[in-house]
Amino acid sequence: MATLEIECPICAEVLELSDQDRAELQPGDVIVCDSCNAEMEVTRSGGGDDFELELLGILTTCPSCGEEFEVTEELLATAPTVEAADGSEVSVVPCPHCHARIELEFEEESDGADLSRQYQSNS
Ligand SMILES: [Zn+2]
Ligand SMILES: [Zn+2]
């Protein structure tokens, strides 16, 4: 039985999906990475290697209050961006728990949503 290995776009953990797993997954289903809690939605499941995931969101831990919350593409789309000291652009999202403004830096790659995170303290 063929097993498809999918690398988590956030933490690079390899998720193994057997033919059986993929047969049970329909577009719209959500897979959660065991390692970093990133959520990925199945966008294509056509059998064989015809399988695609789209990153939905990341559970992240607020550096200020320690509570977890989810950063979604939607949240990022509405988040204001500011220019960091080094000239890169960072998104500012509010923590829903303590309302700290958290700066998240995402590196965009041409082939889609490859996000890398970096916290900056915002005191
Ligand atoms: Zn992961
Ligand atoms: Zn917080």
Image (cartoon, rainbow, N blue to C red):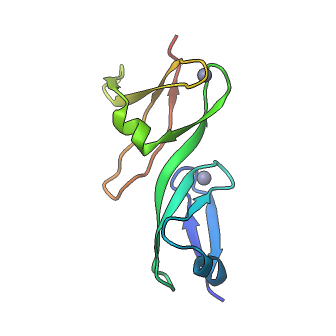
- Residue depicted at 60% across the width and 41% down the height: 59
Q: Name the side, left or right, on which 46 lies relative to 70.
A: left
Residue 92 at least partly seen: yes
Q: Quadrant of residue 61?
A: top right
Instruction: Say if 82 sits above or below 14 in the image.
Output: above
Q: Position of residue 116 (x, y in %)?
A: 48, 43
Q: In which quarter of the image is residue 79?
A: top left
**Figure quarter occupied by ligand 2:** top right
- Residue depicted at 66% across the width and 20% down the height: 65
Residue 106 at least partly seen: no
Q: Where is residue 70 in the image (x, y as percent from the top left)?
A: 56, 39
Q: Quadrant of the N terminus?
A: bottom right
Q: In which quarter of the image is residue 7?
A: bottom right
Q: Name the side, left or right, on which 113 lies relative to 97.
A: left
Instruction: Say if 17 sits above or below 81 in the image.
Output: below
Out of 84 and 68, give the one closest to the viewer: 68
Q: Where is residue 119 in the image (x, y as percent from the top left)?
A: 52, 28
Out of 116 and 41, give the one closest to the viewer: 41
- Residue depicted at 64% across the width and 77% down the height: 21
Instruction: Say if 49 sits above or below 33 in the image.
Output: below
Q: Where is residue 23 in the image (x, y as percent from the top left)?
A: 59, 81
